[in-house]
Amino acid sequence: MRALKSAVLGGILSLTAMGVSAETFRWASTTDPQTMDPHAVNSAPVLSFLNNVYEGLVRRGKDMSIEASLATSWEPLDGENGWRFTLREGVTFQDGSAFTSEDVMFSYQRASSEAADVRSWFAPVTEVRVVDDYTIDFVTSAPNPLFPDSIANFMILDKSWSEANDAALPARDAENFATMNVNGTGPFTLASRDPGVRTTLTPNANWWDEVDHNISEAVFTPIGNSATGLAALLSGEIDFIQPIPLQDIAQVEGRDGFKVLEGEETRVIMFGFGHEHDTLLYSSDVTDANPFTDPRVRLAAAHALDMASIDRVLFRGKIEAASQLVPAGISGFSESNADRPAFDPARAKELLSEAGYSDGFSFGLKCTNDRYINDEALCRAAASMFAAVGLNAELSTGPVRDYWPQLREDDFDMYLLGWSPGTFDMEHPIRFLLHSQDDERKLGSWNFGNYSNARVDELLPQIQQEIDLAARQSMIDEVVAITQDEVAYIPLYTQPLIWAAKENVDLTQRADNFFLLRWVTVN
Amino acid sequence: MTAFLKKYEGLWLFVHSPAAMVAAFVAALIIIGAVFAPWIALVNPYDLASFSLFDGLLPPVWLEGANPKYLLGTDDQGRDMISSILYGARLSLVIGLSALTIAAVLGVGLGLAAGYYGGRFDAVVMRIADVQLALPAILTALLIDGIARGILPAAIQQDLRVAVLTLAIALSLWVNFARTARASTFVQMNKEYVQAAIMMGQHPLRVMFIHILPNILGPLLVIMTVDLASAILLEATLSFLGIGLPADSPSLGTLIRIGMQFLLSGEWWILWIPTLFLVALVVSINILGDFLRDIFNPRLR
Amino acid sequence: MVYFILKRMVQSVFVMLAVAFLAFSLFRFVGDPITQMTGVETSVTDQERLREELGLNDPFVYQFARFTGDMLRGDFGFSYRTRQPVAEMIASRIPATLELGLVALIISLLVGVPTGVYTALRPRGVLTQTILMTTLVGVSIPTFVIGIILIFIFGVQLGWLPTFGRGGTVQISGWESSLFTIDGWRALLLPAITLGVYQLTLTMRLVRAEMMEVMRSDYIRFAMARGVPMRSLHYKHALANTMVPVITIIGLQFGGVIAFSIVTESVFQWPGMGLLFLESIRFVDIPVMGVYLVVIAFFFVLVNLIVDLLYVAIDPRLRIRDVS
């Protein structure tokens, strides 16, 4: 009997060892992608999910570097500003139609239409020309060295499929075919879609690239409640979940058969100020002035924060303190300005005295409570630290859906913000957060406090057009130095990325928090 | 005469019922603790300068790594657990009792009037009650919160969060009072003493509040205890869903929501101590409520 | 009687309108839908254009009139978040919530009635006191705490039951049911218990109170004197009379179950209407929120109408005044 058993076992083991068996992979996250249309909403959950189904001219690799995807190569245009992309031949969409430059042109028109939410990516583009079936030119109004990087998530749709199914434009209010159905060139295709409940993907047999995974079916379920999500992982019902709360790391690691993947996201968390506010809105003692217009007061606030303790207690040592608006390692990070104000409450009080506020003052600190990891706890800790130097913060937290409107209406004294550069380059936050507000030219749209410095405004277009990397970096360095001196924002830390999975699953964690199935192996 | 006997009988029963005694004791302890919190507690959890992150995540005193100053440990911000639950109980009770009072006054008032006048007025009140029932407590809380934010000046909004939450909970509870008062009033309206009072020309308000009200108090008192428990639980649920009080002025419900994050992470005390406290409080209220119900219903003895 | 029903139906329409009006007018305070529909890089001009297209800049009265007008014509609009037709979204979620509520109700009855009877008949027993104490504690713990505890004991530690979702469902001409598969029942059990605990306690106490009262009534004593066997007494006479008010209360409570289910669905990720509502709040998905509330209002109004009819039928005293 024993011999028979071991023979059977041996047989089974050898069978599995022979080939990599195809597996069903179940995973979950807190937010369901709200649409299957890659041009309809420019949100990370949507783009991350659709990166498994659709592809763009270029894509980002495991280390975030730009690689060839549907375009095999690209080079700057001769005699005008822009780029020429040479497309990959022999690629077919999931429904069998061939991929040509017609589809790229169509997708460009679709993605830059008024109905698309991703059109800001094409703001620099003045014209797109089809040269032949496998060559296409993107002409830009000014030299734009980062253009290929900026369209890493621009996904190509099949022209004939979209037009045949009435999806030539992304859906605005009512859904259309592309909201629930896909036809991409990517490694997976949609098997079923139940919004908010479950979405299933299966491998695309026609995919042009090498298959690195062993998934036969991938099932995604949104689980909004993090305790439930963790339970689902630990009970074995799902194989992977992103993210898990920091305090559960020890639990997951302590259990056999599970592992935690830790990394740093490219998101920097910071405090912002109302640089143009004449008075504080939420103060009970200073009602005729805004102390935060004085850079010494802002610097005092920065010195009051003990990031080391916050790291240790609130984030279990997982965060990296930030000195500027992008994390170290991102293109454009200013090495020469990599220091942040030290924790120095004595200096903070000194600065406040110099500015005329030796008794401190009260003000309102506005934060979200459901947007960033431990955002509420962070703000409470910060408020407590501010209080220790006399800056009495009245903390107000709320859900993110109310937050942006309040910030847009200038309803704050100091606020919390997290920023992830979409192009993975320092120019991005300069454009959105440091340049003065300019609605016409679409600059400074997230610069709620309207921090304004003429030199910074002058440098931005130069940075955008500079091809020489060294010159570009020195201009960026200058911007960072200026904004640090003036304490435009108080950068705090880089947000950690914490994923959890079963031990037998090999997957790759990317710094933009995108999860790609094509790198998953279930052992 | 009957009221007199009832009073003494109630006391006799109370002293001979161990459950009721224990419940009253626990409730009294919690209430005294809550009322005197500012004097007893080590730390004022609402004063951001009175605690520090360094003391965060300390376990209760019988575990390793504890600081004997904090008997039941600290939460992630460094606040003493005992202080937090005392202040939290205070806030929960304040909210619960205020909400209950508003609901009772509103509900009984409307119910009495509906029962007294009947006809169209009754229909209107009942339909308003339907509207109220149709709006889940969650939404009521959200919406009142929203109006408050839209109407009130920015500076006092934070201070009024408690008031806003209380109002929201009260609005979810008044219908119970109204319906019961109305049904009981209908029954009383047919009684002779009421008919007599009306015929004598007494003012309706006088009839309602001086004559009818004392006779319908029984079931209303029972509802009060049940609803006090409901109010406290409702506040905890709203906090869980993120619509309750913000974390820097925590009630028991908010403390539980914060504690939920630590369910599996090893710092179990941040969740279970406030939960235990809340459950003890609500159980005591429920026991006392049962007791009151039994007193007012002599047929059950 | 017919006149009464008609009158109530007209009033019901007013109720639903009032709910819609209240809810709609206050949606503007729930947040800004546009920022939930667009990404970080969307320019302010594009956001404004979207706002204009969706009619969010129109005066309130205009928006409300459009909303009600559309609903009366059967057009329930499209979700801001997923762009799906709202009617379809809500309809697809109704089976999940109704089944959950129904099973919770059945559990509460199956356990509540017998325990109520038992505790009424043996008021001083040890088991009775234990049951009473346990249920008291059970009803004092917030629903979501019960849910999470159950998930961790039965889902994670013991691994007996699934921790989220509906499990295996079967389509029966448009109604997606989880009652026909073992998997479905396994997934349904924990949420139904969580939801049913409160109902259970209520039912049990009600049955107990009514039973005790009935047992002391004269006609029971006379029946005892006549020598009717105890069992027949308990079940035929006493229980029958007990059930009547219990049934009407249950009708009312079913409405409460639907409301409570929001929290349960959130904890168990149960894809019902409650979860949909919570998510639509998070995303400021106004069309979904509006229709959901009107649907709930309609449902409550219906239940109240039935209960009122039952009340009038049962208790003749209420017929003396013009109850409508």
Image: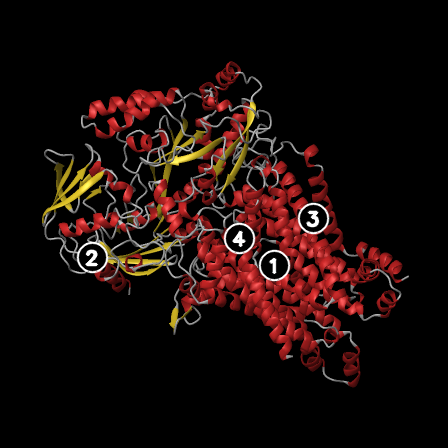
Task: Return the residue nearer the eye: A380 or C302.
Answer: C302
Q: Position of residue A112 (x, y in %)?
A: 25, 46
In terms of secondary structure, where does tag 2 sit? loop
The numbered mark 2 sits on a residue in which chain? A
* Residue A523 percent across, percent down from the top left: 26, 51
Q: Are marks 4 and 2 on the same chain?
A: no
- Circle 1: is it few (<14), some (14-19), or many (20+) Cα within 10 Å? many
Which one is in front in this view, the residue at disc 1 or the one at disc 2? Answer: 1
Q: Are marks 1 and 4 on the same chain?
A: no
- Name the secondary structure under disc 4: helix
The subunit carrying tag 1 is: B
Q: Which residue is mark 1?
A: B132
The reply to whether discs 4 and 3 touch (Cβ–Cβ < 8 Å) is no
Residue sitting nearer the eye, B47 or A46: A46
Contact between marks 3 and 1 (CB within 8 A): the answer is no
Which chain is disc 3 placed on? B
- At a point 40% along the width and 51% down the height, the residue shown is A234
- Residue C302 sits above or below residue C272 on the image: below
Cα gap from disc 4 to disc 2, whole angstroms: 48 Å
Mark 2 vs mark 3, foreground winner is 3
Q: Quadrant of residue B40?
A: top right
Residue type beneath disc 1: Gln
Give yes or no for contact between labels 1 and 2 (Cβ–Cβ under 8 Å): no
- For disc 2, the marked residue is A204
Q: CA distance from mark 1 to mark 4?
A: 15 Å
